[in-house]
Image (cartoon, rainbow, N blue to C red):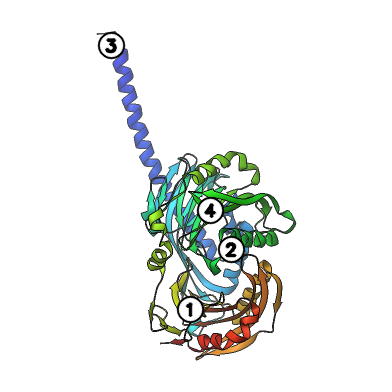
């Protein structure tokens, strides 16, 4: 009996240790929740105080948004614009979950930022407006004895319906792929993409991006790659180096891809990127794999390859994938050549004989309408976004012009002009340019703001020689705009 006592004592001590440990874990989780809440309360205070120096003590020295989001340099510019443009800034965080995983803390939250237009006291602009509302996944780490943000990503909560463990499976398009076990899968929103997913590597900086969109301008995979490649070369300038490019096969479909290394100056993060474009069923599937920094490529490339190898398309669903995607994402109603959107309270009509389709360009888009003249590559697009920023029409148009000049070749811009669209005053400009994957185009841009909605008309003549013939139709589209 005495011989058994030491053994029983060990069991008893072991149970006591386990009990104590479980109690400590519960206590630590409660304390952690409080620390996370204090972190966001503190950060909200720096915004309310418009204290940029204090705000940036909440970021890790290695912070970056997942994949192509803003680095600290760009966040500083955005924050400076926020402080100059708005007063009474209020940030509210609804913490949905926080979980310690290894040395990191994963926080799911919904964030709302509100503010009053600077200098607007006494008029309608002084109303408190919602400037941003998004769900986020943020990964916090311990640095310098306190919590700091290491990386973050916008989350599309609805996108989790397509997740089955580490596998993304889209029932609309029939696309699926699987992430390695230790990677983080994040359904997200991304400009121009109907749906998007981020797959974050264990190094918390390298990532895979997947998204799909309706094929623009009937471009194929090679044209899309070349267009993206040309834009990236222009932005990266002398830092761009390409290892390879060429046709490939993915999931039994023809694709086009390449491998490059570059630095975007304002971002200042060097990366090695593999890009893969695949067209099927009227949709463009885009896969991008970024090692950040580029020296991490050997570590993360096996994970990238496993994702690409797992990529598949359901042949039956792929046949009418574009129609399926449009039915899922498009908004508004089309009756006898007139598009109506109840949310924006507006109507737009197509010229007689032109096709009219409702589409969507992804994140932040209220609607997109596309119109094609008969027997032509030319088209007119009308897009609308929620808009509460204090920018002037001249600033918005200048941004459009400079943005095009940054990515296109041989840009010739005619003088801009004021334009009246119904009871709203806007700005208009005409540019001729060449863009790989599209060709040479003559574009008329018209933009204006009505009831906190930004409307952008892009009327493209492809080739430019068609512009004079199509101009009356472009005018008719702009002049058809009405709002309730």
Of 395 and 90, the residue lying toward us:
395
Q: Count neighbours of disc 1 (C-alpha within 10 A) and say few if under 14, some if 14 to 19, many if 20 or more.
A: some
Q: Secondary structure at mark 4?
A: strand
Q: Count neighbours of disc 2 (C-alpha within 10 A) and say few if under 14, some if 14 to 19, many if 20 or more.
A: some
Q: Which callout, 4 or 3, points at the residue further toward the start of the chain?
A: 3
Residue at image mark 2: 51
Q: Which callout, 4 or 1, points at the residue further toward the start of the chain?
A: 4
Quarter of the C terminus within the rendering: bottom left
Residue at image mark 3: 4
**Looking at the image, is mark 4 or mark 3 nearer the viewer?**
4
- Where is residue 321? Give x, y as percent: 42, 61
Residue at image mark 1: 453
Q: Secondary structure at mark 2?
A: loop
CA separation in Å, label 2 and label 3? 66 Å
**Looking at the image, is mark 4 or mark 1 nearer the viewer?**
4
Q: Secondary structure at mark 1?
A: strand
C-beta proximity under 8 Å, tags 1 and 3: no
Q: Which callout, 2 or 1, points at the residue further toward the start of the chain?
A: 2
Residue at image mark 4: 254
Residue 102: give its label: none
C-beta proximity under 8 Å, tags 4 and 3: no
Q: Which callout, 2 or 3, points at the residue further toward the start of the chain?
A: 3
Of 393 and 238, the residue lying toward us:
238
Identify the residue at the far front of this view: 375
Q: Count neighbours of disc 4 (C-alpha within 10 A) and say few if under 14, some if 14 to 19, many if 20 or more.
A: some
C-beta proximity under 8 Å, tags 4 and 2: no
- Where is residue 439? Give x, y as percent: 64, 70
């Amino acid at each position: 009996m005495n011989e058994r006592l030491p053994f029983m004592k060990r069991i008893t001590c072991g149970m006591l240790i386990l009990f104590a440990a479980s109690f400590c874990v519960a206590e630590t989780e409660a304390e952690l929740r409080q620390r996370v809440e204090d972190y966001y309360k503190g950060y909200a205070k720096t915004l309310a105080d418009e204290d940029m120096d204090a705000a940036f003590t909440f970021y890790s020295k290695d912070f970056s948004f997942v994949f192509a989001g803003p680095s600290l340099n760009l966040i500083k510019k955005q924050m400076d614009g926020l402080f100059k443009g708005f007063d009474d800034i209020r940030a509210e965080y609804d913490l949905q979950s926080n979980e310690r995983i290894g040395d990191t803390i994963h926080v799911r939250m919904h964030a709302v930022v509100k503010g009053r237009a600077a200098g607007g006291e006494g008029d309608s602009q002084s109303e408190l407006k919602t400037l941003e509302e998004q769900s986020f996944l943020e990964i916090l780490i311990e640095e310098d004895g306190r919590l700091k943000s290491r990386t973050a990503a916008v989350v599309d909560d609805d996108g989790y319906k397509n997740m089955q463990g580490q596998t993304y499976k889209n029932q609309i398009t029939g696309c699926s792929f699987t992430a390695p076990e230790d990677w983080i899968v994040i359904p997200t929103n991304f400009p121009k993409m109907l749906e998007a997913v981020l797959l974050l590597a264990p190094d918390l900086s390298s990532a895979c991006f997947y998204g799909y969109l309706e094929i623009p301008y009937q471009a194929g995979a090679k044209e899309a790659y070349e267009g993206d490649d040309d834009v990236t070369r222009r932005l990266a300038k002398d830092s761009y180096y390409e290892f390879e490019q060429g046709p490939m096969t993915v999931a039994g479909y023809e694709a086009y891809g390449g491998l490059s290394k570059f630095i975007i100056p304002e971002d200042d993060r060097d990366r090695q990127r593999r890009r893969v474009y695949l067209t099927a069923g009227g949709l463009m599937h885009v896969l991008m794999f970024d090692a950040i920094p580029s020296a991490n490529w050997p570590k993360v490339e096996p994970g990238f390859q496993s994702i690409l190898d797992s990529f598949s398309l359901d042949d039956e669903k792929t046949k009418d994938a574009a129609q399926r995607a449009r039915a899922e994402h498009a908004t508004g109603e089309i009756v006898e050549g007139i598009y109506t959107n109840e949310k924006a309270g507006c109507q737009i009509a197509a010229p007689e004989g032109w096709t009219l389709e409702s589409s969507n360009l992804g994140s932040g888009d209220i609607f997109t309408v596309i119109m094609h003249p008969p027997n032509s590559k030319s088209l007119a697009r009308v897009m609308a976004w929620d808009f509460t920023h204090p920018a002037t029409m001249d600033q918005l148009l200048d941004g459009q012009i400079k943005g095009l000049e940054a990515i296109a070749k041989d840009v010739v811009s005619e003088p801009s002009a004021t334009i009246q669209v119904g009871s709203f005053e806007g700005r208009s400009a005409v540019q001729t340019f060449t863009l790989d994957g599209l060709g040479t185009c003559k574009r008329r841009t018209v933009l204006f703001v009505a009831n906190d909605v930004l409307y952008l008309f892009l009327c493209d003549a492809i080739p430019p020689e068609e512009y004079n013939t199509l101009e009356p139709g472009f005018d008719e589209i702009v002049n058809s705009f009405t709002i309730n």
